[in-house]
Image (cartoon, rainbow, N blue to C red):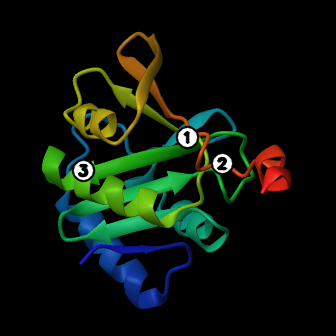
Amino acid sequence: MITVKTGISKKEKTKIAGLLTEFIDLYGDFYITKNNLRLYIKENLQIFFNGLKRGNYIAYDNIGIASIVGYADKASRKYIKILANNEKSADKLIKALLWNIPKIPLFAKIKKDSPFKNALYRNGFQFRGGRGKELLLVREINKENRYDRKNKDKT
């Protein structure tokens, strides 16, 4: 069963650290950015765990880990990061996260040849731009899902 949450316990930290050793980040997409530096999560676990304590989301199971970063540092853009067995596993993790987070625009920066991009496309992400070997994808919120004061006043 996929677990989705923000804060984590010591026991969960051990489980997540163990999962991170099982999965290989072939495409180098599982990182967080601090002060314009890419910090790969496997080598910077404490920073990652601190972000989870401060509001970032994580979805994990034995099929992989997906996280939404940007809440902890109040960034204007929230990014989804995925590390999974395969595209099908990534799809399940993305769905679990999207079901449990607030309705906000989400971004993904991913390598062009990553199989996870297809899972992102299936979950509503669209091409926004590209730079070199990377793609920027965005999942906008639907108007009917967004809080809209005008619509509230009409009802």
Q: Which residue is mark 3?
A: 91
Image quadrant for the N terminus?
bottom left
Q: Which of these two is toward me, 128 or 132?
A: 128
Instruction: Tell me the distance, in whole angstroms, between the alpha carbons under discs 1 and 3.
Output: 20 Å
Disc 2 marks a residue whose amino acid type is Arg
Judge depth for marks 3 and 2 and give the one in front: 2
Disc 1 marks a residue whose amino acid type is Asn
Q: How many neighbours does mark 3 have within 10 angstroms: few (below 14), some (14-19), or many (20 or more)?
A: many
Instruction: Tell me the distance, in whole angstroms, between the alpha carbons under discs 2 and 1.
Output: 6 Å
Q: How many neighbours does mark 2 have within 10 angstroms: few (below 14), some (14-19), or many (20 or more)?
A: few
User: Could you tell me which secondary element the residue under label 1 belongs to?
Assistant: loop
Q: Which residue is mark 1?
A: 142
Give coordinates of residue 128: x percent, y percent.
49, 19
Of callouts 1 and 3, the N-terminal one = 3
| Residue at image location 14% in from the left, 50% down from the top | 88
Q: How many neighbours does mark 1 have within 10 angstroms: few (below 14), some (14-19), or many (20 or more)?
A: few
In the picture, measured across the screen, residue 144 lies left or right of residue 147, that is left
Q: Which residue is mark 2?
A: 146
Judge depth for marks 1 and 3 and give the one in front: 1
Give coordinates of residue 148: x percent, y percent.
76, 47
Q: Is residue 91 above or below residue 105?
A: below
In the picture, the disc for residue 151 is none
Give coordinates of residue 106: x percent, y percent.
54, 41
Give coordinates of residue 13: x percent, y percent.
42, 79
| Residue at image location 44% in from the left, 56% down from the top | 98
Disc 3 marks a residue whose amino acid type is Asp
In the picture, measured across the screen, residue 69 lies left or right of residue 36, that is left
User: Could you tell me which secondary element the residue under label 3 belongs to?
Assistant: helix
CB atoms of marks 2 and 1 within 8 Å: yes
User: Could you tell me which secondary element the residue under label 2 belongs to?
Assistant: loop
Q: Which of these two is toward me, 78 or 23?
A: 78
Of callouts 3 and 2, the N-terminal one = 3
